[in-house]
Amino acid sequence: MKGTVLYGPRDVRFEERDAPTIAKPTDAIIRISATCVCGSDLWPYRGISRVAKPTPMGHEYCGVVEEVGSAVASVKPGQFVIGSFFASDNTCPHCRAGYQTSCQHKEGVSTAQAPRLRVPLAEGTLVATPDMPPADLLPSLLTLSDVMGTGWFAADAANVQPGKTVVVVGDGAVGLLAVLSAKQMGAARIIAMSRNPSRQKLAQEFGATDIVTERGDEGVARIKELTNGVGADSALECVGTPESMMQALRSTRPGGHASYVGVPHGVALTGDDLFWGHVHLHGGPAPVRRYLPELIALVWNRKIDPGKVFDLTLPLDQVAEAYRAMDERRAVKVLLRP
Ligand SMILES: [Zn+2]
């Protein structure tokens, strides 16, 4: 089997790897229908996170179950399934509280840019769709594996409510789907911070009512201006840099909520930032598994179309070009088909 391996900065290869097999009775093997490149894959691709040895890549996936271990009863061969980037048992105290990405037995799923994938803890991790999906739903279903669930968590963790004002910091795929999520949750005003015309357009299609191009102090001033000097009820940080975190915190009104779902790189908050802001903070690796049943239903019934974030589709063997296109911001997000 050929699969994706990252050797070092900007060195992605599609090469022969061992095909996955059932290693534990709790495993499943799935045949990938669609996978993609994540914004977080770009951190090691760009050399910002170090790659110590050749590393198989990919953690967003959906596909058809081929084989299950003897302890897996909830999904069967032939079913179409979606799972999160962390496998979870869905039974421990953290899972039961809805934080499956903090599962006491969690295991990373990190080899999905390949034709076949081993999913550990399959019973707790995988959720089947009602039937085999029509082809046009594949992109939207794929987003539920990470990017859409992460945008949804950003909105949920920032307590987005009907009629409220929301700021979304970041115009990557997660930020764009955070806009869609805020819209679906009934926000009245959704301010998207973006400088890129094609991303601004997609943000507006997903429900953004205002676009702010300014950043830093000017960006905060612009948010204050748009909210009569008050600030937003909810601010959703979808990047992970110190600048984007401060943008989100300082855009939130006293008593408001800020969430953070971008993997932090160099973010540090002072006691003063926390003390004087009067802001509720919540975030982390999105517990995508919690939202899968609800989001599958929304996609299945065509209430949301998060698959629109994919603006390029390539055959899986051209995965190196997919990374290049996202690195150079020629594409928002690239879907890969085995
Ligand atoms: Zn658990």
Image (spheres, grey):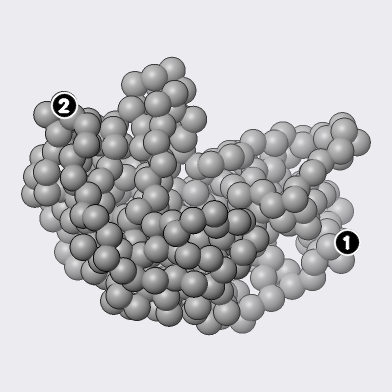
Query: Quick one: which residue is furthest to the top in this view?
Result: 93
| Circle 1 SS class | helix
> Is 132 positioned to the left or the right of 285 in the image?
left
Q: Which residue in the rendered view is the most extreme toward the front?
A: 53
Other residues around mark 1 within 10 Å, as few (<14) / some (14–19) / many (≥20):
few
Q: Position of residue 286 (x, y in %)?
A: 50, 42
State which quarter of the image contains the N terminus.
bottom left
Is 301 on the left-hand or right-hand side of 132?
Answer: right
Above or below, comparing residue 204 to residue 247 in the picture: below
Mark 2 or mark 1, which has the lower sequence index?
Answer: 2
32 left or right of 51 in image: left
The amino acid sitting under disc 1 is Asp
The image shows residue 281 at horizontal and vertical percentages of 70, 36
Q: What's the residue at 62%, 64% (across, down)?
A: 47
Figure quadrant of the C terminus: bottom left
Q: At 29% across and 37% down in the image, what residue appears?
A: 120
User: In this orientation, which residue lies closer to the viewer: 321 or 18?
Assistant: 18
Task: Residue at 19%, 68% (x, y): give it.
Answer: 135
Q: Quadrant of residue 278?
A: top right
**Residue 179, image quadrant:** bottom right
Residue 269 in which image quadrant? top right
- Give, as a three-letter code, the residue at label 2: Ala
- Where residue 106 appears, x then y in whole percent? 41, 32
In this view, the residue in front, 34 or 106, is 106
Q: Cβ(mark 1) to ligand 1 < 8 Å? A: no
Q: Secondary structure at mark 2?
A: loop
Residue on which the image places disc 2: 71
Q: Is residue 121 above or below residue 5?
A: above
Q: Which residue is labeled 1 in the image?
A: 217
